[in-house]
């Protein structure tokens, strides 16, 4: 049994740092097992106090500690497993330390470690303390100069900032000296050393400065970084045009590594990326890969201002950099790929990840009040909901004032670490408005539920809308306050045409109603016909919406709502109702046929974007449906959803086949949004046809796979064969592996596909794959590809025997022994145990109890497991 209880860190306990580190000089003598790190820190006391100097340091072998050139005896300093403490210091001094670390043995992949024979760092959130003693907190900003020495076989020696000097050393070694002129916290430090190919380019900024751009990748892979470079240049120009932000160093670098806990990291001037989010060519990468590369390259670059130049005072303010930067990268992607399609994709991600988080025991505010391990708060609430809050702010104050507020934020806080309060204050200052109530979005957990009811008087042509809101209790917050939220509304007539109306005497065809309290009412006049209310257009607030709309209204919206998000949403609402009804034992076969006919009309719409049509064809996911059913029965949901898919496949068969043939790609591959949309629609037609498993469809899917000239179509065919099952799928799996076994990123897709297999026996297949020679649980990409996809496989993970839960718990405990951060991210699928039927919930809870009781459990896993079990 676990005997000690880790103590939480609380926002209310924040105190400014006792000491500030003005300059940091580091010397790395790199060796795989015995790296020496010398640090020379110029330190001054922050305020009037007599506290000792306390620096963080973990897994460090001490060599020496000196103050102002005087070597300290053991009695003059204290070193334990987490800290270096030095008492009786002057107000200003120079601390010099030397430590030894073992990068090759570092399988947790934080601090300095080795990946693919190269040295690499990951310091966010608390990795720098595994490199040397330091005040490893984001409000201590220092100017870094770094000297890196290594054997010449580690050809590239990279760190933050600008290269100042390089040269040859005796004994077959060499060195490089880097200087970052901008103060930064330790979490933004980066170092990479190894054999890497370089892709180089240049960009001229808006003030005429030339910036060198370099992307470093595995030898022979530089061609696959071309799209990332193109994305980077577009992101840099976009940030200049939209936010007025220009890059500030002479050099911007990105390095791709295979072993990485995150997607990417925004270290100042030297971004480090998971290879999966940087390398792409048509043969090995899907359109989704290209889309994610574009988005993540932009995200990490945008951090240069929202995260690097301005950082967070403490880790409770994590949303200040992440939520804001997600908002910026989503805005960029909307401009690159189409606003409506991008908005739908962003909301799908929000609902899949954050809404489920809000409905479970791991629900927390956008700015949490306490944590055991900050690693556990890199969550969808911080990122995606954090972005939605900023989107609402922009909607409420308008585009012009939002830009003014951002400009003020950049001017006021450049070079500093700050808080969410100060960020919001910038917008209050430019608008003159009191945004105190809006700030509650950062402090209150949970997803508000908004209800909208309407009444229309044909004689007076008056429409009245009544809106209310309520938020269910979440852990630690049983009582909720009403939040200010914008509801964007338009009106349609019975034929789907836009209806104009008057609000306060002003003629409009769309308006934003701000629900400030628990309830509000609004009246529109001049409404000529009984309206279909198109509410929450563009998903203007991160809420669930219940209305008094009838199915006939949803069909009007599905056919012609000019707000494409709400057109798509109408289809999703109709599908949810049909699947829920069937899962509850009340199938509506007439309604299912009507829905199929409506989808057919949508597919025939020549004006509609193929990417949008592909989204129309995609039914709500089983995880999404499980959120709406209380308690959720994954087996019943799976069967009901498959029944609707089958009906759609039968009804739309001729249309689907025609589209599949007509959209076949014959020319040269292009990753642009229009081409990707056509491929998405073609693969969506095949996916739906696979719901009707006949020999003809198997032949079609197999032909699709065999004839594919790019990875998008190859995976589309392989996915359809998986849904069909049988010999054709088994044969294609073998063929795929043999063709791509030397390409790790492609084989990750092979593992992921099998993790998603909804057929019986999937667990046995997945367990067998953990013994496959290509499976490596120490590599986060490979582990997530197989295990995380299986845990998201509603049909098979929730097997009534509980064997899926046991398998996941065993994996969590095994991985926790060497990589707690990655292990903790596997806990969440068990955390929703209360949402499922009592039989399943009891089995899930038992596995969480087993995990929480394990001796030697990391703080990361312990925190999430115990929170999931708490009342």
Image: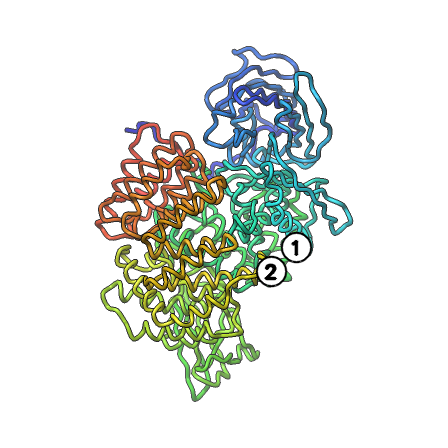
- Which is nearer the eye, 331 or 262? 262
- Which quadrant is the N terminus positioned in? top left
Q: Which residue was labeled with disc 1?
A: 238
**557 to the left or right of 338:** left
In this image, 641 relative to 119: left or right?
left
Q: Is residue 399 left or right of residue 573?
A: right
Along the line of sight, the residue nearer the viewer: 334 or 389: 334
Q: Is residue 750 above or below residue 653?
A: above
What secondary structure is marked by label 1?
helix
Q: How is the image coloured?
A: rainbow
Q: Nearer the viewer, residue 696 or 613?
A: 696
Can residue 58 be seen by looking at this rendering? yes
**Secondary structure type for disc 2:** helix
Residue closest to the far bottom: 459
The residue that mark 2 highlights is 335
Q: Position of residue 51 (x, y in %)?
A: 55, 24
Contact between labelled residues 2 and 1, with CB atoms less than 8 Å apart: yes
Residue most extreme to the right: 208
Label 2 Cα neighbours within 10 Å, binned few <14 / some 14-19 / many ≥20: few
Density class for disc 1 (Cα within 10 Å; few <14, some 14-19, many ≥20) is many
């Amino acid at each position: 049994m676990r005997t000690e209880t880790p103590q939480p860190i609380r926002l209310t306990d924040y105190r400014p740092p006792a000491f500030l580190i003005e300059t940091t000089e580091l010397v790395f003598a790199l060796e795989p097992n015995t790296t020496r790190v010398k640090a020379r820190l110029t330190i001054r006391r922050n305020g009037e106090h007599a506290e000792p100097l306390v620096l963080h340091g973990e897994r460090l072998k001490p060599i020496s500690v000196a103050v102002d050139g005087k070597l300290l005896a053991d009695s003059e300093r204290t070193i334990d497993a987490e800290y270096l403490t030095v008492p009786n210091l002057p107000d200003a001094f120079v601390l010099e330390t030397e430590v030894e670390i073992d990068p090759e043995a570092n399988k947790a992949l934080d601090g300095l470690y080795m990946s693919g024979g190269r040295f690499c760092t990951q310091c966010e959130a608390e990795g720098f303390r595994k490199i040397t003693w330091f005040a490893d907190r984001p409000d201590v900003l220092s100017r870094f100069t770094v000297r890196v020495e290594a054997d010449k076989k580690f050809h590239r020696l990279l760190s933050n900032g600008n290269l100042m000097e390089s040269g040859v050393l005796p004994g077959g070694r060499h060195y490089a000296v880097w200087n970052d002129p901008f103060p930064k916290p330790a979490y933004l430090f980066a170092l990479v050393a190894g054999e890497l190919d370089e892709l180089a380019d240049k960009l001229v900024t808006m003030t005429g400065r030339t910036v060198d751009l370099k992307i470093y990748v595995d030898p022979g892979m530089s061609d696959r970084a071309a799209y990332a470079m193109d994305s980077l240049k577009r992101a840099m120009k976009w940030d200049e045009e939209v936010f007025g932000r220009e890059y500030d160093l002479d050099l911007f670098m990105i390095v791709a590594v295979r072993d990485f806990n995150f997607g990417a990291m925004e270290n100042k001037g030297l971004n480090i990326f998971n290879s999966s989010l940087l390398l792409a060519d048509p043969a090995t990468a899907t359109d989704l890969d290209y889309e994610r590369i574009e988005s993540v390259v932009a995200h990490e670059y945008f951090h240069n201002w929202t995260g690097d130049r301005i950082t967070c005072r403490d880790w409770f303010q994590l949303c200040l950099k992440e939520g804001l930067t997600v908002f910026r990268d989503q805005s960029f992607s909307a401009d690159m790929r189409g606003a409506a399609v991008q908005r739908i994709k962003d909301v799908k991600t929000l609902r899949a990840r954050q809404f489920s988080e809000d409905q479970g025991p791991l629900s927390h505010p956008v700015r949490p009040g306490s944590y055991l391990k900050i690693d556990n708060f890199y969550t969808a609430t911080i990122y995606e909901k954090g972005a939605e809050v900023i989107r609402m702010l922009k909607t409420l104050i308008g585009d012009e004032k939002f830009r003014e507020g951002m400009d003020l934020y950049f001017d006021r806080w450049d070079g500093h670490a700050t808080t969410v309060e100060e960020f919001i204050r910038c917008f209050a200052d430019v608008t003159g408005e009191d945004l105190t109530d809006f700030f509650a979005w950062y402090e209150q957990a949970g997803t508000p539920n908004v209800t909208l009811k309407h009444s229309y008087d044909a004689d007076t042509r008056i429409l009245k809308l009544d809106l209310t809101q309520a938020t269910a209790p979440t852990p630690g917050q049983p009582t909720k306050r009403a939040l200010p939220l914008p509801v964007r509304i338009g009106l349609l007539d019975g034929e789907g045409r836009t209806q104009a109306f008057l609000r306060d005497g002003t003629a409009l065809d769309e308006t934003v109603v701000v629900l400030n309290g628990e309830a509000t009412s609004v009246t529109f006049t001049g409404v000529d016909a009984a309206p279909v209310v198109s509410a929450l257009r563009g998903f203007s607030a991160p809420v669930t919406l219940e209305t008094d709309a009838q199915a006939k209204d949803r069909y009007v919206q599905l056919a012609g709502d000019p707000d494409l998000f709400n057109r798509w949403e109408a289809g999703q609402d109709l599908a949810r109702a049909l699947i829920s009804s069937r899962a509850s034992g009340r199938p509506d076969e007439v309604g299912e046929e009507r829905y199929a006919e409506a989808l057919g009309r949508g597919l025939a719409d020549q004006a509609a974007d193929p990417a949008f049509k592909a989204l129309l064809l995609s039914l709500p996911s089983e995880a999404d449906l499980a959120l709406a059913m209380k308690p959720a029965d994954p087996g019943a949901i799976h069967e009901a959803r498959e029944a609707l898919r089958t009906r759609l496949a039968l009804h739309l068969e001729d249309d689907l086949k025609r589209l599949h043939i007509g959209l076949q790609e014959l020319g040269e591959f292009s990753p642009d949004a229009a081409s990707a949309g056509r491929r998405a629609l073609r693969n969506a037609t095949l996916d739906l046809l696979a719901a009707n498993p006949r020999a003809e469809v198997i032949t079609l899917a197999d032909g699709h796979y065999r004839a594919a000239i790019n990875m998008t179509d190859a995976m589309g065919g392989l996915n359809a064969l998986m849904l069909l099952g049988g010999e054709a799928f088994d044969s294609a799996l073998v063929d795929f592996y043999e063709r791509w076994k030397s390409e790790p990123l492609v084989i990750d897709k092979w593992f992921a596909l099998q993790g998603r297999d909804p057929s019986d026996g999937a667990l046995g297949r997945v367990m067998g794959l953990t013994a496959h020679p290509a499976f490596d649980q120490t590599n986060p990409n490979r582990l997530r590809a197989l295990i995380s996809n299986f845990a998201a496989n509603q049909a098979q993970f929730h097997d009534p025997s509980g064997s899926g839960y046991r398998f996941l718990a065993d994996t969590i405990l095994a991985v926790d022994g060497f990589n707690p951060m990655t292990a903790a991210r596997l806990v969440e699928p068990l955390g929703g145990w209360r949402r499922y039927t009592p039989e399943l919930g009891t089995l899930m809870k038992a596995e969480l109890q087993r995990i929480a009781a394990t001796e030697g459990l990391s703080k990361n896993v312990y925190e999430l497991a115990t929170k999931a079990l708490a009342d």
